[in-house]
Amino acid sequence: MDLGTVVALWRYPVKSLKGEPLDRATVLADGLEGDRSAALIVETPTHARAGKPYRGKESPQLHLTGDPETAASYAMDAKVQVALDHREPRYFDAHAVSLLFDLWVRDVEALVGEPLDPLRWRPNIYVAAAPGFTHREPDLVGTTVRVGSVVLRVIDTTRRCVTTTYDVATGASLPPVLGEVARQRDNVVGVYCEVLTPGELARGDVLTGG
């Protein structure tokens, strides 16, 4: 069954920094090649995140730049010392691949009354739903989907935090985004997937399931 068409792909070379749009992606056993392969690690010993990645939760400006030095300067403005780190294979919050349908974004747009950039949810794969597709996130958990030569299993819904309130172009906060998602969608937008079969996928590929 056709679920939809891939209309955008992103990877995030440095965790929490600006996404890199892709026309085509190589998907490895542990996620998109080059996705979240580095992070800014907090070096300020008194900070609550000392020794851990500095994230969008700590700074609404991080996603405005893909340059680690610029992002480090934003951290310094908040008196937090960070250093770029590549020691871990990946710096995921939870699982390897994030999948988002435009239908789910429209749900939130209807709740807050204005258009929202899907990058607020930092997906890897953004899909325009096929006509008749009505599934919400919990409906897909446990299912297997195919796109390009890649096979994925949906393993969890994606629970959201304050970073979704930040405008991806300005960093300005829109608190109702998270408030309405928490109240009306059980704090969920999007799903996480694990990779069953690595391969290639591209914008324009059809996502199938069932």
Image (tube, grey):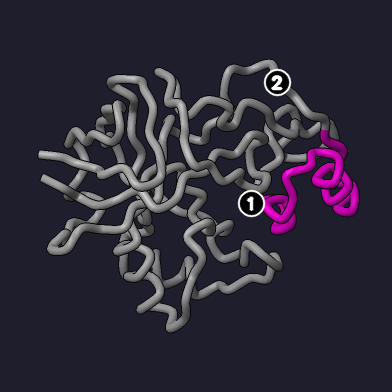
Q: Which mark is residue 24?
A: none
Over which residues does the magenta segment extend?
57-82
Q: Which mark is residue 57?
A: 1
Q: Amino acid at mark 1?
A: Lys
Q: Is residue 77 left or right of residue 39?
A: right
Q: Is residue 61 left or right of residue 187?
A: right
Q: Quadrant of the N terminus?
A: top left
Q: Which mark is residue 86?
A: 2
Is 74 in the magenta?
Answer: yes
Q: Position of residue 94 (x, y in %)?
A: 45, 34
Residue 108 found in image quarter: bottom left
Q: Nearer the viewer, residue 95 or 119?
A: 119
Q: Secondary structure at mark 1?
A: loop
Q: Nearer the viewer, residue 200 or 3?
A: 200
Q: Position of residue 117 (x, y in %)?
A: 51, 65
Q: Residue at x 47, y 81 (%)?
A: 114
